[in-house]
Image (cartoon, helix red, strand yellow):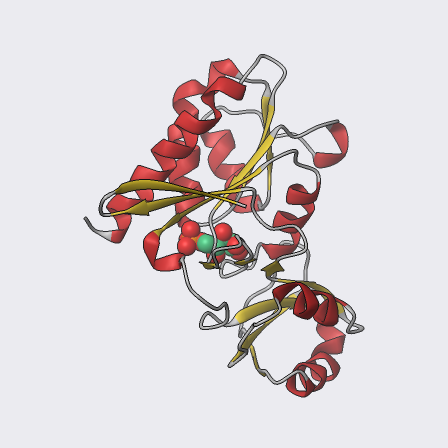
Amino acid sequence: MTQDELKQAVAEAAVSYILPMLESDTIVGVGTGSTANLFIDELAKHKNKFDGTVASSEASAERLKKHGIPVYDLNSVNEIRVYIDGADESNEHLHLIKGGGAALTREKIVVACSEEFVCIADESKLVGVLGDFPLPVEIIPMARGHVARELVKLGGDPVYREGVVTDNGNHILDVYNLEILDPVALEKSIDGIVGVVTNGLFAKRPADILLLATKDGIKTLKR
Ligand SMILES: O=C[C@H](O)[C@H](O)[C@H](O)COP(=O)(O)O
């Protein structure tokens, strides 16, 4: 199976997983990226079974709306039953690196408002130790130099993601060469740097379930 076929398989598995949760008033949180896009396309087949969605990016909101799926402002909903999103890396504890598509801040906010976080990924994303994928950090533009120097002190090599502006009007530093042995501690340390909006470690609030597409079928990993 190709990586695209694995992503399609896990998108379908995610819809099967959430189907029993869908009721007329259910709000579904929707992530961002190529795997989330396939999930959106599958979810559209069931759009009459739930109320609507909250999206973690403008791109996902647009795709949902094209399918005729309602997209609500986060401040107008009381509860998100389940949030579905991809990841750039996951370890066995379901600590994640996210933000390859620069949507990390809104993703983390929607996760924080969701009862359950289901991560969907193909098997290439499961790693022993996080950090081969450069860690995205969303920053306030004027703080770029300061944040970069602080990230070097933490052992990383930050690289400015040229030309990228997030949905929040901010910039991204991708931090290379971090061997992330304690994801929770590093997430907190980076969040403590003045000028950092969010970092792409999802460890304080990891995924609850990882649906992993493998060549032998879908595997379900739980915390
Ligand atoms: O900012 C983007 C998100 O965190 C994505 O969920 C992540 O980059 C994974 O994307 P993909 O499913 O395209 O590999």
- Can see residue 140? no
Question: In the displayed structure, does residue 153 sit left or right of residue 213?
Answer: right
Query: Which residue lies at the image location 61% right of the left edge and 48% below the top edge?
Result: 107
Q: Quadrant of residue 153?
A: bottom right
Residue 120 found in image quarter? top left
Q: Is residue 158 left or right of residue 143?
A: left
Side of 73 relative to 120 (left or right): right
Residue 157 appears in view: yes
In this rendering, the answer to whether 3 lies above or below 146 is: above
Residue nearest the viewer, comparing 223 with 45: 223
Which image quarter: residue 171?
bottom right
Whole-percent x and y of residue 127? Answer: 42, 63
> Residue 104: percent from the left, percent from the top?
60, 56
Please give left or right for residue 98 compared with residue 143 in the image. Answer: left
Residue at x-position 66% and y-position 42%: 110
Give the residue at x 56% y 14%.
23
Q: State whether residue 186 is above or below residue 92.
A: below
**Residue 28 x, y percent position in the rendering:** 57, 29
